[in-house]
Amino acid sequence: MKQTIEIQAVDLVRRIRDAQAEELADKSVAEVMEFFNRAASRARRRSEALQAVPKSTGASNKLRIPVARKPRQNRG
């Protein structure tokens, strides 16, 4: 049986946003730009590394989280 994880996406995004705002509160515009440029570079490197992994190893599956879905209700 597959185990599912319920994710509260809005709360997660708000926590990330609040943490970033706190970290960047006293930074100059140049420092804020550097922060996001570094984050983008890390994301690109990670994406490229994951694309280089052969799919047969199952490594790409490690990033997927099964989502519990509610059955659709008929609208009619």
Image (spheres, rainbow, N blue to C red):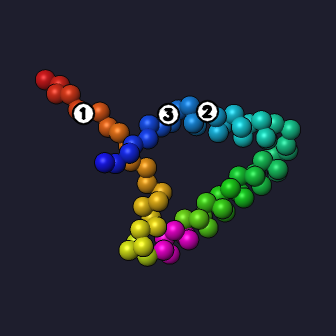
Secondary structure at numbered mark 3: loop
Residue type, mark 2 in image: Arg
Circle nearer the N terminus (2, 1): 2
**Which residue matches tag 1?**
71
> Which residue is located at x 48 percent, y 57 percent?
63
Looking at the image, tell me whether mark 3 or mark 2 is earlier in sequence order. 3
> Which residue was labeled with disc 3?
8
In the figure, residue 72 lies in which quadrant? top left
Does dot 1 land on a helix, a strand or a loop?
loop
- The residue labelled by disc 2 is 14
In the rendering, at what x and y percent does residue 15 appear? Answer: 64, 34
| Badge 3: residue crowd in 10 Å (few <14, some 14–19, many ≥20) | few
> Distance from label 2 to label 1 (Cα)?
28 Å
- Label located before the other in sequence (1 or 3): 3
Give the percent coordinates (x, y) of residue 7: 47, 37
Is residue 69 or residue 18 the one in the foreground? 69
* Horizontal side, residue 42 vs residue 66: left or right: right
The answer to whether residue 43 is magenta is no
> Residue drawn at (81%, 46%), measured in percent from left and top?
29
